Amino acid sequence: MTALLHVREGRAGDPAATPAAEPLVEIRNLLVERDGRRLLDGIDLTIAPGRIVTLIGPNGAGKSTLVKVALGLIVPSAGMVVRRPGLRIGYVPQSLAVDRTLPLTARRFMTLADVHGRRPRAAEIAEALAEAGAEGLEDRSFHKLSGGEAKRVMLARALLQQPDLLVLDEAAAHLDMPGQIAFYRTLRAIRDRRGCGILMVSHDLHLVMSATDHVLCLNGHVCCSDHPDDVSRDPAFLALFGPLGADALAPYHHAHDHVHDHIHGPGGCTAGCGPEDDAHHADTGHHHHH
């Protein structure tokens, strides 16, 4: 039997589509195969304006593949993918490899962005940095920014696109707990202010509850898909992550005003950084304000 493949970019003037109501991206019965191996099968995903959707699952579950399909970077083997007419996307990578021999300030990094065929204006850069919580970093060397500071500058650069959909791969990677909470709070504020949709890939189960509206748990197929509260009790989720995973998906409350010092001393990182955080261990102190 021949598989059905339907990938469509919506067209302006389409009477079946009302921009205010239609999804930003809609995926139905998605199948992705590579080299005879089935990476994703039977995936349904809808990303609506003003909604935060988070993809979770073990390594190799197909999260990054699904993001690439949503972005149009991978053509699926079968299924339907429809994107809203004129969809603008801002992408924040997990990390960015920049030649450390290049003299590059945060401002210069921002000016290299292509904003719909032109370079961003100074006022646009200042506004985006402020919205991302990165004001005051303009003249700092991009190489000397802490993990959290660099993440916020990359977020600001994505905001220059005036995105309808903001996509983040491992949004809180290289951040300590207070930094993660502050960053997710910034994302929610951006969503509230702009009404954009947000698609995130995350391993931070303990923060998903407060950071997202909808969780899609993947393992090559959709194990479960619902509000975080419901997903944490789903038998398929429990089978995949166990009771500890369910506990990790519970809400994490942290609301006060102070400054956290994140110090990397001779004894290592006091905030519990993992081996993947080596890239920012050259910094002697990180401050997270919230």
Image (tube, grey):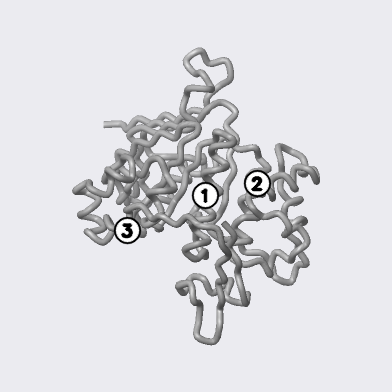
Q: Which residue is mark 2?
A: 131
Check disc 3 and give the amino acid type. Answer: Ala
Q: Earlier in the sequence, mark 1 or mark 3?
A: 1
Q: Residue at x 36, y 59 (%)?
A: 59
Q: Is residue 230 left or right of residue 252?
A: left
Check disc 2 and give the amino acid type. Answer: Glu
Q: Earlier in the sequence, mark 2 or mark 1?
A: 2
Secondary structure at badge 1 equals helix
Q: Residue at x 41, y 46 (%)?
A: 54
Viewer-nearest residue: 150 or 66: 150
Question: Mark 3 packing: few (<14 Cα in 10 Å), some, or many (20+)?
Answer: some
Question: Mark 2 packing: few (<14 Cα in 10 Å), some, or many (20+)?
Answer: some
Task: From the top left corner, tell me how far across and down residue 109 is, in percent.
Answer: 73, 56
Q: Which residue is mark 3?
A: 248
Q: Which residue is mark 1?
A: 185
Q: Is residue 133 left or right of residue 182?
A: right
Task: From the top left corner, tell me how far across and down residue 129 is, in percent.
Answer: 69, 50
Q: Residue at x 63, y 61 (%)?
A: 149
Viewer-nearest residue: 23 or 212: 212
